[in-house]
Amino acid sequence: MPPESPSVLLLGVDAGGSHTAVAIGDARGRVLARAEGPGSAMRPGGAERSAAVILDVARRAATQAKVSLPAVFAVVGAAGAGFAPEQDALAAALTEAGVATRVNVRTDIEIALAAAFGDGPGMLINAGTGSIACARAPDETLHRAGGYGWQLGDEGSGYWFGRRALAAAGRSQDGREESSTLLERVLLALSLRTLDDLVRWSTTATPAQVASLAPHVLNAALEGEYVAQRIVEDAAAELLLLLRVLSRHFPGNDPIRVSTAGGLLLPGSPLLAALRVKVGVELPRARFADVGGTVDGPAGALRLAAQLFAAPPGN
């Protein structure tokens, strides 16, 4: 830890649906401390709620670094903040809460790109509670595919896995699908006894609660459960489709760097293994980055904060 407090304090924030991560650093973008907390993704009319969560996590990071808020400048990558009204509302709420004097809010995927590739080109696939792919093309333009929420899609995401597991449980119970252990696994995970209990649970379950079932599907697939393995293969095909769409923005024959983010694509995940196989067959130009796991979103946001803070006025 630095012996003296930095003269300029910057924040990088990854405000996701299931967790919030904050990196606090100096003007060069060096990380001084980190903290994590519950999700703070933007919801309609929810800027103050998101700001309150981010403030709490940022305060804990500041305490570890032995510094005080507000920071001079913060870059926040927020899930659910894909458009200017949501970004402006969250920036205003964070400034009002005392997180930072100046706040720049952008999508969570933009900070992930910065963490994965710096200023260079590449494609990033994210599968967590939701799913999305984004890319920075060789001409520096940004593109995205998917990421429209559980109502419209989020194929290959945690919610999608959970929904498929619930459907498989009911179909297996009726004999409409192969016998599966997913019903027993889901009941055990939720401390329920019968399918009727599960039906009642599902009527009030939030998307995040449904997404929490995804690890049980992945574990079943690792143990050889056929229905779970088929779900994993289908999910990998959906994520591959997102990457295929983005690959159109990379003309020529040069390799395309690919990185991963999200809890479903951590090392050892059968989904990551299946995706690598499919990408190897259908996108031979793709080259997965070996980053030791998922990308470091808050560090990417902090790097952007340092770049923007150092940029001449008007740039």
Image: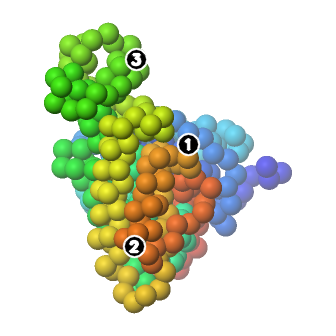
Q: Which residue is mark 3?
A: 188
The answer to the question of whether label 3 and label 2 lie on touching residues, with beta carbons closer than 8 A, is: no
CA neighbours of label 1 inside 10 A, class few (<14), some (14 to 19), many (20+)? many
* Image quarter (top left, top right, bottom left or bottom right) of the C terminus: bottom left
Element at badge 1? helix
Q: Which mark is residue 58?
A: 1
| Residue type marked 2 | Leu
Of residues 53 and 141, the one drawn nearer to the viewer in this rendering: 141
Where does label 2 land, which residue?
A: 283
Residue 225 image point, x, y percent: 40, 34
x and y, in percent, of residue 71 in the image: 57, 52
Residue 66 percent location from the top left of the image: 72, 42
Relative to 171, does residue 74 appear above or below in the rendering?
below
In the displayed orientation, state which residue is furthest to the right: 3
Q: Dot 3: few (<14), some (14–19), or many (≥20) neighbours within 10 Å?
A: few
Residue positioned most to the top: 193
30 over 310 or under it: above or below: above
